[in-house]
Image (cartoon, grey):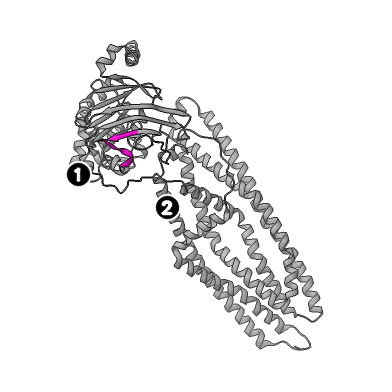
Amino acid sequence: MSENRNNNSSRASVRGPGVGPGMRGPLQVEKPKDTKNTLKRLFRYLGASRYKLLALVILVILTALTQLVAPIFQKNAIDSIAITESNPSVNFNSLTFSLIGMAGIYLIGVVFNFLQGWIGAGLSQKTVRILRSDMFSKMSKLPVKYFDTNTHGELMSRLTNDIDNVSNALSQTITSIIQSVITIIGALAMMLYYSPIMTIVSLLVIPLVLFVTRSIVKRTRVLFKKQQEALGRLNGHVEEMVTGQKTVEAFSRTNIVVAEFDEINKDLRKYSVKAQIFGGTIGPVMNVIGNISFVLVAISGGVLASMGMITVGVIQAFVQYSKQFTRPINEVANQYSTIQSALSSAERVFDVMDQIPESDDFADKQFDVASVKGDVVFKNVNFGYTPEKQVLKDFTINVKAGQKIALVGPTGAGKTTVVNLITRFYDIDSGEILLDGENIFELPKKGLRSCIGIVLQDTVLFTGTIKDNIRFGRLDATDEEIYAAAKTANADSFIRRLPDGYDTQLSEQGSNLSQGQRQLLSIARAVLADPKILILDEATSSIDTRTEMNIQKAMIRLMKGKTSFIIAHRLSTIRDADDILVIDAGRIVEKGDHKSLLEQKGHYWQLYQSQFTRSDAV
């Protein structure tokens, strides 16, 4: 089967092109996305807690109603003490009733406010928990290419900082927005009820409000987006420098690293200052517009009162409702920077969640790992990280079950790519890869990868005990099987010398062990997994020569009966390979065993001579 494969599984190797943990690309400034769509998606997450949301909405409505009822009591109280022809004396009964009503309504409002704050906080935290879980789950299903083309710090920033921004906005503004809508509608209704004329006067400023808001929104949205992107770059740089701190110190590049940090930090400061300035201006501007509205209402109210069309109490009530009508707009304006930052963060989170996950069309197909023999065939395989640059060209090999195949060649020749294609971390452009005669693209990925064991050059260990890290190779393994695997990998002796032995806690990436010890643990993990196909990608590169010699026999026992692919720069480690493939520029230029390749005096002979001549000179 020879066909193009352009699915989402990625074409980038862990050593391929892209912006990985050790590379940083330029700041990419995207256009702001659709706010409505972002809000809809956030509200769908809120809908997951529909009962809490319903309770919150009810409490918000009740709180808003208490605020709408309060001016009525104020109006009645003022009218009770106002001396007019129709009311020649103070009406103490009405005044007393109005004051008691005001006290009661304010007390009820306090209770409702407390309850809505309590439920609102729980709702926002639950929503963010679900959002963070969905994002992490989605990230775990993305192809390797996505992680190769995005810095780790950038992804961490989206999972932590951006979601925290969303959390803060939800907890601070969700009740405010709902209550604002209800208050605006209720206040407008009461304003129309008391005086349609004054209502029209107070609404004259609305076009000005819309114009100012639109003008500021257009600018601040872009700035907040840039601010979050700059923060992601900063996190990526910090993560990079913390990881490579020893290298920075060894090459005396501290000043350069600090200068790069300062440059990124300046970008963040620049965008943050501009965003905060523009976002912060809308509140004061809205207050000024609100004061203009208040002046217009006072003038029109005074004219109407002098004409006997309304009472002083009505003017007081109308002013209160006018404030209630404009206050929510002002509150949203004052929270605008928080809202904009949250929307920008939500867009970045949803951008990750909108990425196409790694597909598997045959996930439900039955696949018996135990029945795998280990025959691997590459037929006319072509593959490239980018369409214009092919890494493997018409690549063809036929590996029988149990054979040990060594891949050698200069850096970038395509050795690691061959191995990664077998695991389907990346899909080929054309050709076929067969496992026991069956195309691997018609096998379930989980089953395919279950029969492959990998020991990479870059050791990956997890926080936990040594025993836990070895057991990662097979979760149902007993302690005795773990000890046996460690002995096979020649790791048992150094483990037992540790204070807590196999229960020794590893720090991040096992930094409390030497590089060689970490590599031995990864080998023990592969031994425990007992795979049908074994991949050793520079597995002994970080182990000293004496330790390497000690584990050669163990590695031979490990590879016995397994199809093994060995990538090694140390040619001394592959002398007993059944076949050695010399790869250059994506093609097999030589093939044979160690002895026959030396007799050819070709590429392999040159590699061998350069390596051992250099060793002799030393």
Q: Is residue 154 left or right of residue 543?
A: right
**Residue 218's spot in the image, x, y percent?**
65, 50
Q: In this view, does 182 lie to the left or right of 583?
A: right
The label on residue 478 is: 1
First of labels 2, 1 by sequence position: 2
Q: In this view, does 344 lie to the left or right of 473?
A: right
Q: In this view, does 4 lie above or below 86?
A: above
Quarter of the image where the C terminus is located: top left
2 or 1: mark nearer the eye:
2
Please tell me whether mark 2 sits on a helix, a strand or a loop: helix
Q: Give the range drawn in magenta.
A: 432-443
Q: Looking at the image, do the residues carrying marks 2 and 1 touch, with CB atoms under 8 Å apart?
A: no
Please tell me whether mark 1 sits on a helix, a strand or a loop: loop
**Residue 106's spot in the image, x, y percent?**
58, 75
Task: Evaluate whether residue 157 shows in this view.
Answer: yes
Q: Which amino acid does label 1 sit on?
A: Thr
Disc 1 crowd rating (10 Å Cα; few below 14, some 14-19, many 20+) is few
The residue labelled by disc 2 is 134
Quadrant of the rendered image containing residue 520: top left
Viewer-side residue, 523 vs 579 = 579
**Residue 547's spot in the image, x, y percent?**
26, 25
Viewer-side residue, 68 vs 34 = 34
Task: Evaluate whether residue 542 shows in this view.
Answer: no
Quarter of the image where the N terminus is located: top left
Is residue 521 one of those drawn in magenta?
no
Q: What residue type is labelled 2?
A: Asp
Q: In this view, does 254 lie above or below 530?
A: above
Disc 2 crowd rating (10 Å Cα; few below 14, some 14-19, many 20+) is few
Quadrant of the rendered image containing residue 403: top left
**Residue 452's spot in the image, x, y percent?**
28, 37
